[in-house]
Image (cartoon, rainbow, N blue to C red):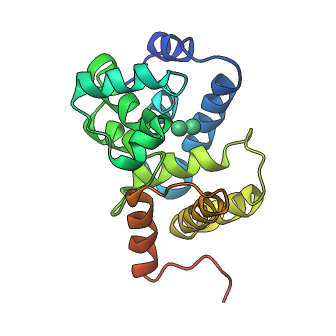
Amino acid sequence: MLCNDEMRKGILSRLHGYRFEHTLGCERAAKFLAGRYGGDAEKCAFAAVLHDMTKQLSKEEQLNLCEKYGIIPCNVEKNEPKMLHGKTAAALALDEYGAPQDVADAIACHTTGKAKMTLLDKILYLADYIEDTRDFPGVEKARELAEQDIDRALLYCFDQTLIELIGRGKLIHSDTIAAYNDLVGQGVCWRDA
Ligand code: FE
Ligand code: FE
């Protein structure tokens, strides 16, 4: 067993308020998507429980963890240190919770996406986006697509994220562009023909 009840409770006890509710929602969504797309439900749920474990950390704490685990922030991450929470949570998942590498990899890319995402990567990314407590424009469409086709749903999420970042004048991580290009390059399209 990857994560027994006691370990799960221990991880969840580090989360507070909205982050706690969001993580439980993400765990439910990850299990649903695992069932829908033939993913490993145990790994998907474990990744979901761990994915935002370091999100509440300060900029300094985030950068200290990077230093400790040899994570070298890119220019975009230096500008937006919160973006590092996927990578720092992945490092802790491996080091403190004995997570398998593929679970850690999914956690590491849950904020930005990346090219050549595995089914586990895709499930965590999408679960994080569509879970029940989410309430932003477009989430209903993402949920609808998530029931139909995981790649179309994923591309919809990247499209919305890119549009939103550009709208706010924010930097875009190169991994998000790589994720978008990878899906579009494969002929994925979420719009109805
Ligand atoms: Fe996150
Ligand atoms: Fe999250």
The residue at the point 41 percent across, 55 percent down is: 119
Residue for point 62% across, 49% down: 129
How many callouts does the rendering have? 0
Please provide percent x and percent y for residue 185.
Answer: 40, 80
Q: Where is residue 76 shown, x and y percent of the image?
A: 41, 49
Q: Nearer the viewer, residue 37 or 60?
A: 60
Q: On the picture, is 61 further left or further right than 69?
A: right
Q: Quadrant of residue 147?
A: bottom right
Image coordinates of residue 193 in percent, x first then y, are: 66, 90
- Specify whether residue 188 is in view: yes
In this rendering, would 55 be left or right of 64?
Answer: right
In this view, which residue lies farthest toward the bottom? 193
Q: Is residue 42 visible?
A: no
Q: Position of residue 57 (x, y in %)?
A: 50, 21
Vertical side of 193 occupied by 98: above or below: above
Q: Residue at x 27, y 21 (%)?
A: 95
Q: Is residue 85 above or below residue 145?
A: above
- Of residues 163 and 37, which is closer to you in this image? 163
State the quadrant of the N terminus.
top left
Horizontal side of 136 relative to 173 (left or right) equals: right
Residue sticking out furthest to the left? 70
Residue located at (41% from left, 19% from top)? 61
**Image quadrant assignment for residue 21:** top right
